[in-house]
Amino acid sequence: MAIAISIPTILRTYTDGAKSVEASGSTLAEVIADLESRFPGIAERLLDDGALRRFVNVYINDEDVRFLGGVDAPISDGDAVTVLPAVAGGS
Amino acid sequence: MRFDSLLESVGHTPLIGLPRLSPSADVRLWAKLEDRNPTGSVKDRAALAMVEAAEADGTLTPGCTIVEPTSGNTGISLAMAARLKGYRLVCVMPENTSPERSQLLRMWGAEIISSPAAGGSNEAVRVAKQVSAEHPDWVMLYQYGNPANAEAHYRTTGPEIFADLPTITHFVAGLGTTGTLMGCGRYLREQVPGIEIIAAEPRYGELVYGLRNIDEGFVPELYDASVLTSRFSVGPVDAVRRTRELLELEGIFAGISTGAILHAALGAAAKAVKAGKAADIAFVVCDGGWKYLSTGAYEGTINEASAALDGQLWA
C-alpha cells in the first residue's frame, strides 16, 4: 500500500494534470521529498525554508498537519493526504 | 424574556443535550443553538459587536455606508443592524451562494455587489477592498480582521457555554473568519486548563480553490493557530450526512456547516470513548437549514445532495 495524495488544481501542472498521486515515506517531509523526485519543482511550491508555506494547507486523513507536527507529522501506508490552498471561509 | 429592542436580544442562546447522538452517559454532546439569534445565525453576535465598536470609536457616524465581504450570514446580520440604526449597507457576495441569502439581504435593505464564483470568498474580500478604496467615506468593518468579532465571542458565547456546562472538555466550531473559535477558545482556555478547541473547516469543490497563484491564498488576520488544539477539513458528504443525522436523531434542523462541525465533534467523542475518558463536548449550531433548501442538500441520497453542493459555498 502507498499514501494517496490529492493535488489541488493549481499544482497539477507538476503532476501532468493528475488529481491524485501516490508516494511513500514515514513523515510528511519524506513524502514531499518522494514527490519531488518524480515531480520536480513541486516541493518548492509547498515548502519555504523546510516549513509549509503560509498559504498551503496539508491534511492527513482530514486533520491539519500543523497540529500533528508539521512536516515531521508521521504518516503510514494507507493514509490519505490532501493538499489545499488556504482560502477565505466564513460568511 | 423581555428586551427593549431586537438588538438587545442577541445571544443568550440555549445549550441542548443530544442524548441520541452522544455515544454514552459519560461522553456527551451539547449543541449551542445559535440559530436562535434575531436573524437566525451566530453572526448576529459579531456583526452587532463590530457595529457598536465602530460607533464607539467614531468610525461609524449617522448616515454612513457600510461595505462588507460576506457569503451571507454576516451580511444578513449587518443588514438588520444597519436598518435599525440607520446605515446603508453594501455587501460583496460571491455569486455561488444560495439565492435565499441574496433575497434576505435585499429584504433587509442591503445592496449587493457580486464577486466571481471562482476563488469563493477570497474574491469577495478582494472586491470589497477595491470598492472600499474607491469610496474612502464608506466603512468596511472587515469581519476577517476586526478584533470586535472575536471579542464578541470572548465576552458572550464563551461565558454562556461555560456557565451552562462547567464540565466542558471540548469546544468545536466552524473555522471561517475564525472569530467564534478565537473568542470562545481564548475564554474557555482561561477557565478550563487542558480543554480541546477543535476547528472544523468546510472543504469545498475545486472551483472554490481555483486560485491563479498559491500566493493569492488567504488566512484571516484574526487567526491564531495557538488557540486551537486541532483542525479538521470536512467535505460535503460528511457534512450532509451529519446534518441529516442531527435532524433525524435529535430533531434539530441546521445548516450544512453545522453538519461539518458535528462530524468533527463526533470524531472527538469517538476518541474519548476509545481512551475510556469522560467528555462534555459543546459545538456550535451556526444557523438553521432554511437558507440552504435550494442547494439540494436536504433531498435525495447523500451522494446526490453532496454532488449538488459542488461548486457552491455551502458554509
Image (cartoon, coloured by chain):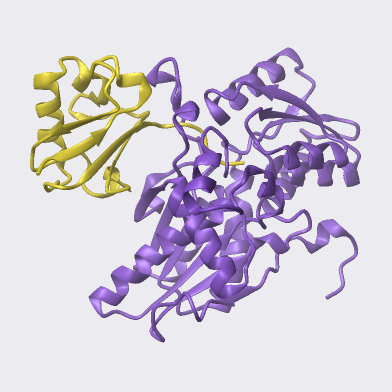
Name the tint of chain A in the rendering.
yellow
Say whether residue B310 is left or right of residue B169. right
State whether residue B44 is above or below residue A10.
below
Q: Which residue is drawn at 57% across and 58% down?
A: B154
Where residue B299 sits in the image (x, y, percent)?
A: 61, 53
Q: In which quarter of the view is residue B128 placed?
A: top right
Residue A29 visible here: yes
Chain B shade in the render: purple
Q: Where is residue B230 in the image (x, y as percent from the top left)?
A: 34, 54
Q: Image quarter for residue A58?
A: top left
- State whether residue B11 is above or below residue B223: below
Q: Which residue is drawn at 44% across and 41% down?
A: B203
**Left of B49 or right of it: where is B146?**
left
Q: Viewer-proximal residue, A62 or B293?
A: B293
Please give the count of numbered marks on the rendered protein. 0
**Residue at 55% from the left image edge and 67% from the top image edge:** B246
Work out whether B277 lies above or below B47: below
Give the side of residue A35 with respect to residue B292, left or right.
left
Q: Which of A56 and B188 is in front in this view?
A: A56
